Image: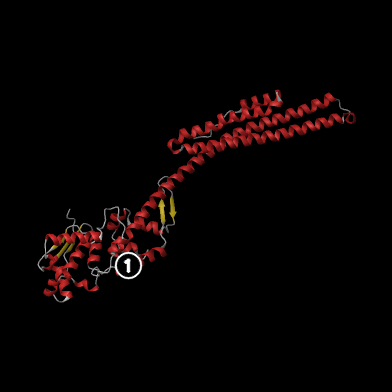
Amino acid sequence: FGDKIYDVTSQVQETMTQMEQAPDKAQKAIDKLKEAVKQSAVKAVVDTAQSTYGSDMKAADKRQIESKLNHEADRMIDKLHTNYEIERNVIENQRVAEQQARYETGKTSEQIDKEFEQKQKAAMEKFNEELTTAISDFAKESTKETVKTVETKKREREKETIEDGVRDHLRGFSRTIPSFLMAYGDNTVTLATFDTIIPDKVFLEVTSITLDQFKFLRDGGDYVEEETGQTKHFDGQLFDSVVFDDSVKEFLALKKKLADYFDEKSVEDIFDYIPPQKTNQIFTPKTMVKKMVDMLEQENPGCFDMPDKTFIDLYMKSGLYITEIVKRLYQSDEMKKQFPDNKERLKHIFEKQVYGLAPTEIIYKIATSYILGFDEDTKDIKHNFRQLDAL
C-alpha cells in the first residue's frame, strides 16, 4: 500500500494549547498526544496492512508490529518533549539571572519578562514544528517498516515451507538408500556416483523425486524463483559425502556378511537393516517366513524331498520365502541322494523347482540379489525369477 500521510497538525496544536494553558499538566497533554498518534498513525498503518495482506499477515505479526511501533512512537515523543523541557528550563534560568542583573543592565522587569516570554514562545513553536514533522515522518516510515516486516515474515514462512519439504524429501530419501544399495549397489558406489547406478524411473518411483532433483540437492545449481522470475543460485551440499560413503561401505559389508542364508548360526538377515518404505515395500520377518514354510510342509508332507516338486512366490518382495524353500530343498537328505554334488543340486533347484514374480524393478533386483547373492558361483545358474506384477 502507498505512503499514506496522516494529518497530525490539529492534534499537536491541541497539545501545545493545553501545555501553554496548564504547564503543570504538560505530561498529561503529552500522554494524550501519544494515544492520539497510536490511533491515527500506528493503528491505521497496521489495519491498512492487515487489509492489504490478509491471511499473509498473521495475528502474531500484527501484535508484534503494533507493539514495536507504539514503543517507537512513545520514545520519539518523549525525546522531543524532554528536549523541549530542557530548553524551557534553560530559558527560565536565564530569565531569573537577567532579573537579578537588571540593575546592571538597565533593563526593567517587564522588558526582561517580555523578552524571555518571546523566547519561550519560540521554543514552543519549535517544539510544535518538530513534533508535527516527526509524527508525520513517523507515519510514513511506519508504513515502510510494516511493509518490510510483513514481506520478510511472508518470505521466511515460504522458505520454511520449502525447507520443510526438502527435509521431508531427505528423510524419505535416506530411508531408501539401503534398498537401492541392496538392488544396485557394489563397492564402487559413492555419493558422487550414486545417481549413475539407478534408473530415473525407479528412483522417482521409490523416492518421489527425480534424479535431476537429487543431483540439484547434492551439487546445487541455478534456478528461477517462481515469485520474482529471478535466476538464483543454490549451493547444494545437502549431503555429507564422508558420512554417506562410509554408510554405504558399512551397509555393503553387512550385506556380504549376512548373504549366506544357509548359515543356521545367523539369526539376522540384511532386511533387518532396511527400513520400511512409504511405497508399501515392507519385508516379511524371517521368523514369519519360517512359520509359513513350516505350514507348507505340514500341508504337503515330504514336499522338500521331491526333485519334481515346484514352488512359486507370486509376489516376491525380499526373496526370504524363496530362500527358505531353497534351503530346505538343498538340505533334504533325499535331495542329497538324488544330487550328491552340491552345485548340481543347487542348479536343479533353481532351474527346475523354484519360481518367483516381483512387481517392480527395484523389488526384483532386491529379491534376486538376496536369493542369488549367497555365493559367487551362482552367477552362471539359470533361474525362473521374473519382473511381473501378478496382482
Instruction: Decide which of 180, 313 is in the foreground and name it.
Output: 313
What is the residue that sits farthest to the right in this orientation? Answer: 104
Q: Position of residue 111 (x, y in %)?
A: 83, 25
Visible in this render: residue 89? yes
Instruction: Decide which of 355, 238 is in the foreground and name it.
Output: 355
- Within the image, what quadrant is residue 29 found in? top right
Name the residue at 65% across, 29% down: 30
Q: Position of residue 195 (x, y in %)?
A: 33, 61
Secondary structure under badge 1?
A: helix
- Within the image, what quadrant is residue 358 found in? bottom left
- Within the image, what quadrant is residue 184 found in? bottom left
Q: Is residue 94 above or below residue 342?
A: above
Q: Position of residue 138 (x, y in %)?
A: 59, 35
Q: Alpha-carbon neighbours of circle 1 within 10 Å: few (<14), some, or many (≥20)?
A: some
Q: Is residue 333 above or below residue 233?
A: below
Disc 1 marks a residue whose amino acid type is Leu
Residue 96 as seen in the image, left or right of residue 226 = right
Instruction: Decide which of 351, 88 is in the foreground and name it.
Output: 351
Name the residue at 37% across, 54% down: 171
What is the residue that sits farthest to the bottom in this orientation? Answer: 341
What is the residue that sits farthest to the left in this orientation? Answer: 308
Residue that carries the numbered disc 1 in the rendered image: 254
Name the residue at 35% across, 55% down: 213
How was this image coloured? secondary structure
Numbered disc total: 1
Visible in this render: residue 317? no
Residue 327 as seen in the image, left or right of residue 70 = left
Instruction: Decide which of 126, 98 is in the foreground and name it.
Output: 98
Q: Position of residue 353 (x, y in %)?
A: 13, 66
Q: Is residue 133 above or below residue 332?
A: above
